[in-house]
Structure formats: structure tokens, C-alpha cells
Amino acid sequence: MITFVGAGPGAADLITVRGAQRLGRADVVVWASSLVPEALLTHARPDAVVHDSAAMTLEDVLGVYAAHPTESVVRLHSGDPALYGAIQEQIDWCVDNGRNFEIVPGVSSLAAAAAAAGRELTVPALAQSVVMTRLAGRTAASMPARESVAAFSAHGATMAVFLSGARPRQLQEELLGPGSGYDGDTPAVIVVRASWPDEQVVPTTVGRLAGDLAATGARTTVLVLVGPALAAGRDGARSHLYSPGFAHQFRRRSRRGSTVGRAARKGAQ
């Protein structure tokens, strides 16, 4: 069995219980030292064969899989494998070669960055959608033209920009391009190495983004969050879900305010 495990954003205790269990049973582990902290390997068996994929090609990784047809193999990916995980070609290899595989989801760096920023990304009346994207750089051929940062900026929704820390000026220009839903005062947060011991969190605005991002000195493991939901304070409307005047299948609408007291009294009867 080949198991693709989401290692989480960095902190060794942010891997899922299932991911840690699979890692602890693995005979062979393939991990990227450039993206996944070595502390994650504490979950692996001391006698597991460990390969560092930082300098490996896809063919090298597949060669490891082919060399261990009967062993339990864990491919440890940063964050969640479904987001920029480069696992699809590995899955295709498994299918073509009759190898059993499974995917264990992980805590994404987006979740860790939002937690570090102390903000909810979907705030009523401000933003109810989150766009996850990246700049088109050396891998521009893989980026559909309709999915550029500039194209998504027109929506003014919360945007999470991955893999773009090395191009701060280009990122700012695309966020402020013609027809953008953002302006120079739109809040932004730069999160470098979310949940790692040396995590950096830099609140800023789109207008200051290029300078503040360059000042971090970071080029990798950077996530930039943009949008009105990131503003400090309580500018958004109250969520309907827990509003006394909003009913759903588990709670009646209340005209007098909180239902907590009545629910507690009923439970005590």
C-alpha cells in the first residue's frame, strides 16, 4: 500500500491522528526536507527506510515505489495533498501499475495561516467565498489564463495566494490591476512558515504588500491572505447561524433573545 499523507502545515502535532498512525506503521517513508519539518519523522518507526525527495525527480520517487512492491510506503506531503500536492501523477502511476493507494488528508497551510492571523476568512456581508490560487511563474504553462490572480481579484473575495513569495511586486500589481475588487487599503496578512517555530505574521494592506513581503526575506513557505474579511474589528454582519431570530432544524426561532437558558432548564428537567 502506498499512502499519501498530508503532513500538515509544519508543526509536528498538526498532522492528523490517522496520518501519524500510517506514518508510524510505514516500512518506507518519502518526505521533502525543504517543505516538511524533520520533527514530523518522530512519528515514523526508527527502522523505517527514509528517502528525502527534496532533490528527487518524479521518476526517482516512482522508482522507490517500484523497488518496494510489498512494503508499506508513506509519501509525506506538506499541508494537504489536495492543494498543490503534485500527487495526481503519482496516483496515475499507482493505477497504471496496479498498486493500492490511499490519501490521508492534512491540515492545510491555509487553515494554519488563518489561525495565525486570528481571523475567519468568511465573514457575513464582507466575504463568503475563498479563492486559493498562485502567481504564474516558472510553471506558467500549467496556469489557465482565466485563473490569474488579476482575474480573480475582480471578485473582491478573500484570496489566499500560495507559492508567490518570491515575486512581491508582481503580486501587488495583479491584485491592484484594472477592474480589481481590491484597493490599496484592502487588508492583507503575510504568513511565513505557518505553525513552524519561526513563524512570521505580518498584517498589512494591498498597498503596502510588496514592501512588507520583501522585508520578510522569505521566498518559500509564504501564504498571502487578502480581502476585507481580514480587517480588524467587527465590520461584518452577524452570522445567522447562531442568531436568536434564525431557526433551523435543531432550534426554534426566539423573539426574546437567547435560547440558552431555556435549553439548559429543559435539559435539567
Image (spheres, grey):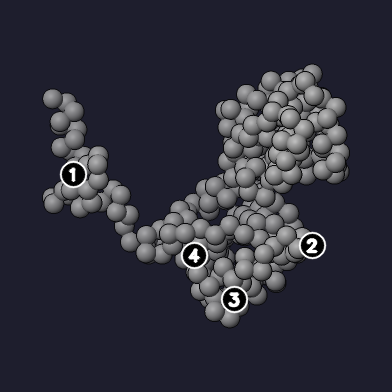
Front: mark 3 or 1: 1
Disc 2 to disc 3, C-alpha distance: 22 Å
Disc 2: which residue: 138
Q: Secondary structure at mark 3?
A: loop
Q: Label 1: which residue?
A: 252
Q: Which sits earlier in the primary sequence, circle 1 or circle 2?
A: 2
- In the rendered image, residue 21, in percent from the top left (x then y), is placed at 62, 24
Per the image, label 2 sits on a secondary structure element best described as: loop
Do the residues bearing badges 3 and 4 touch, measured as CB atoms within 8 Å?
Answer: no
Q: Quadrant of residue 103?
A: top right
Q: Secondary structure at mark 4?
A: loop
User: In front: 204, or 130?
Assistant: 130
Percent of width and height locating residue 208:
61, 71
Q: Is residue 166 visible?
A: no
Q: Tell me, for residue 176, which label it has, or none.
A: 3
Q: Amino acid at mark 4?
A: Ala
Disc nearer the start of the sequence (1/4): 4
The residue sitting at 53% across, 73% down in the picture is: 154
